[in-house]
Amino acid sequence: MKLRVFYKPLKQMLEPDQIESINFDTKMLGVYMEMDGKGYHKLRMSDFEIMWFTGRFDKRRKDIFGGDFLRGDGFGDTKQEIRIVCYDSRQARYKAVPLSLYKANAGNGGWTGFDIKGDGEVIGNIYDNPDLLEGGYE
């Protein structure tokens, strides 16, 4: 399982190589990050937003995670609509969801979206680039 996490108290994204362990029983993550003069910490899972790897890559071979913004993923858009990667619980897979549908659904799952084809480009994510939620086209 590959994942990255967003540490909410410091608003800091941690990449997969910074995550040492995850314990679902104790609800703790072991992470490498500079904080309080130390490099390794065991922290509460509730302080993190977890973004799972979709198993797909963008056109530059960059990993695509849940919560990423994609542009131009073979959707046939001439306007380069931005889509957000969400987990569709009904179909048990990730989808690229138009921002208008994402906003209308308000995070309730069961997404109507497009399969991730891998010919698009990751242009950010919902934690590092929340301003992209306001747009729709770039």
Image (tube, helix red, strand yellow):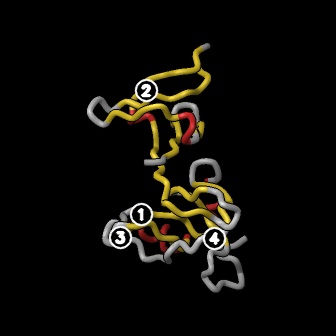
Using the image, determine if residue 107 lies above or below residue 7.
below
**Marks 2/1: CA distance?**
25 Å
Using the image, determine if residue 86 lies above or below residue 12.
below
| Kind of residue at disc 1 | Tyr
| Kind of residue at disc 2 | Leu
Q: In what element is the residue under mark 1?
A: strand
Measuring from the top left, give residue 135's x and y in whole percent.
65, 67
- Mark 3 in CB contact with mark 4 (< 8 angstroms): no
Residue 122: quarter of image: bottom right
Labels 1, 4: front one: 1
- Residue highlighted by disc 1: 87
- Residue highlighted by disc 4: 82
| Kind of residue at disc 4 | Ile
For label 4, the crowd category at 10 Å Cα-Cα, with few meaning under 14, some 14 to 19 and many 20 or more, is many
- Mark 2 in CB contact with mark 1 (< 8 angstroms): no
Labels 1, 3: front one: 1
- Residue highlighted by disc 3: 110
Disc nearer the start of the sequence (1/3): 1
**Marks 3/2: CA distance?**
31 Å
Disc nearer the start of the sequence (1/4): 4
**Marks 4/2: CA distance?**
33 Å
Residue placed farthest to the left in the image? Answer: 25
Q: In what element is the residue under mark 2?
A: strand
- Residue highlighted by disc 2: 43
Nearer to us in this view, 115 or 101: 115
Disc nearer the start of the sequence (3/2): 2
